[in-house]
Image (tube, helix red, strand yellow):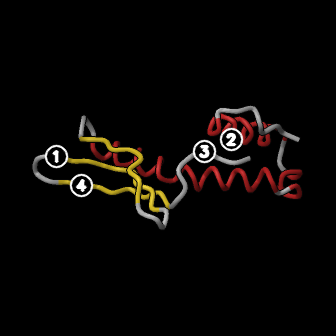
Amino acid sequence: METKFTKGDWKVDVFDSNLIQRASVISYNGEGSVQLLETDFIGNFEEQNANAKLIAAAPDMFNALKDLYDDKEVWSDLFESQQEFICRVLNKATDSNFFKHK
C-alpha cells in the first residue's frame, strides 16, 4: 500500500523568544523541506512541544507497525488482540480498511 503522507525525516523545530514560543514539525526530504505543522504558544508550551515531537515520530511509528504487519513470522507470534490493535492503528493512519489481521 502506497502511503500519502509527506515523505522525509520529520523533525521538530522550536523557536523560543521573549515574545513568542513556537513549535514546528518540518519534513526534510533531500529536495528541501516542508512545514507540516506550526503551533504558537497557547497555554502550556511544554505540552505543545511534546505533542509536536509525538507528531514528528508518527512516520517512524507507522513504519514500525507496518514492518510487524508485513513480517509473517513475527506477525504469527502476536496475539490476535495485538494484531487487531495494529491493524486498527494502521487503518486509522491511512483512513482505510486495507489492513486486516490474518
From the viewer's perspective, tell me whether residue 87 is left or right of residue 11: right
Mark 1–mark 2 Cα distance, whole angstroms, equals 36 Å
From the viewer's perspective, tell me whether residue 20 is left or right of residue 23: left
The quadrant of the picture occupied by the C terminus is: top right
Q: Which residue is mark 1?
A: 20
* Mark 1 in CB contact with mark 4 (< 8 angstroms): yes
Mark 1–mark 4 Cα distance, whole angstroms, equals 8 Å
* Mark 2 in CB contact with mark 4 (< 8 angstroms): no
* Mark 2 in CB contact with mark 3 (< 8 angstroms): no
Q: Amino acid at mark 4?
A: Phe
Compare marks 3 and 4 and give the one earlier in the sequence.
3
Q: Which mark is residue 90?
A: 2
* SS assignment at label 1: loop
Frontmost residue, 9 versus 47: 9
Q: Residue at x 48, y 67 (%)?
A: 30
Compare marks 2 and 4 and give the one earlier in the sequence.
4
